[in-house]
């Protein structure tokens, strides 16, 4: 067992002994988590992933933002990849182009821009939020404004930054009118984009912020307060969930719980 794995095991054991069963992974036993982390760290596919990240790091040094590029090639990529079946095999550029041109749900009608992502596509951590708000819709970037600044502070508290070590996106790429909640059919329409986005970014750890991202990634209908404090697995990728920063701005009493979630995230990331 590596030193970091030992630390994670000790942390989980400490939580259990403190009588905080809600903070101990329920869906994965600690032994399973450690086995998963060790396997990913030591296996050939992990080495392949690292090489692929290095390759993408070179390709995506300029952060993706703004509208899709003009040109016949991009237009063809959009037309091809806009078909749901093609999204599942699109490369990163084609996927982004497909999202930028997407009209698969009603949210296409009222949006100013499609909010695809921010951060580093070669990052180890992928943060998945809910949906763009007014500022995000205007800028084309997720998590800007007050909630975005709080998210940056939360990430900084565990030595992470969207510029270098985090990739950020949302369940929905277009803004729901009036900042209403995403509708189930909108989430279903947008899901192929997110699924493929996760496959292509291939994060080592996922962080879901807010109930919509947490419920989609865990396939649970439980409230966030019940879901948080545990480590899940999304397609074999360790997943931690926590409150949306906008919710934390409204309910400062949840800050301590969010802090615990971030410590759990750090522990999982350090376990590699
Ligand atoms: S929210 Fe998703 S599915 Fe709906 S139009 Fe935007 S990109 Fe397409």
Image (cartoon, helix red, strand yellow):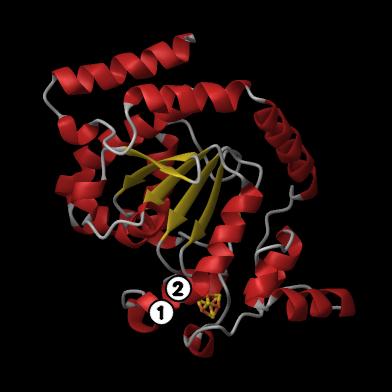
Residue 70 visible at all = no
* Mark 2 neighbour density, 10 Å: few (under 14) some (14–19) many (20 or more): some
- Give the CA separation, mark 1 to mark 2: 5 Å
Question: Which residue corresponds to the image point at 36% horizontal and 74% vertical from the top-left?
Answer: 182
Instruction: Label 2: state its secondary structure.
Output: helix
Label 1 close to label 2 by CB (< 8 Å): yes
User: Dot 1: few (<14), some (14–19), or many (≥20) neighbours within 10 Å?
Assistant: few
Which residue has dot 2 on it?
188
Depth check: give the residue in front, 58 or 224. Answer: 224
| Residue drawn at x 58%, y 85% as measured from the top left | 103
Judge whether 84 appears above or below 90 on screen: below
Q: Is residue 135 above or below residue 236?
A: below
Q: Residue beneath label 1, please?
A: 185
Q: From this view, report whether residue 53 is shown above or below residue 184.
A: above
Per the image, label 1 sits on a secondary structure element best described as: helix
Is 188 positioned to the left or the right of 232 in the image?
A: right
């Amino acid at each position: 067992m590596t030193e970091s794995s030992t630390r994670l095991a000790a942390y989980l054991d400490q939580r259990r002994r403190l009588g905080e069963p809600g903070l101990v992974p329920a869906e994965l036993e600690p032994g399973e988590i450690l086995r998963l982390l060790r396997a990913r760290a030591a296996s050939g596919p992990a080495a392949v992933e690292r090489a692929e990240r290095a390759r993408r790091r070179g390709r995506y040094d300029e952060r993706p933002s703004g509208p899709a590029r003009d040109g016949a090639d991009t237009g063809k990529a959009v037309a091809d990849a806009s078909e749901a079946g093609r999204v599942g095999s699109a490369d990163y550029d084609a996927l982004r182009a497909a999202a930028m041109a997407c009209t698969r749900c009603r949210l296409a009608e009222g949006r100013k821009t499609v909010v695809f992502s921010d951060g580093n596509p070669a990052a180890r951590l992928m943060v998945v939020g809910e949906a763009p708000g007014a500022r995000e819709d205007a800028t084309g970037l997720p998590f800007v404004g007050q909630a975005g600044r709080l998210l940056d502070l939360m990430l900084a508290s565990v030595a992470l930054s969207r510029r270098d070590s985090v990739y950020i996106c949302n369940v929905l790429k277009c803004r729901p009118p009036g900042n209403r909640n995403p509708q189930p059919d909108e989430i279903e329409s947008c899901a192929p984009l997110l699924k493929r986005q996760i496959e292509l970014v291939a994060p080592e750890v996922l962080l879901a912020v807010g109930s919509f991202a947490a419920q989609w990634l865990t396939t649970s209908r439980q409230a966030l307060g019940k879901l948080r404090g545990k480590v899940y697995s999304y397609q074999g990728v360790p997943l931690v969930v926590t409150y949306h920063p906008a919710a934390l701005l409204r309910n400062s009493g949840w800050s301590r719980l969010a802090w615990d979630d971030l410590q759990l995230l750090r522990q999982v990331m350090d376990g590699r």
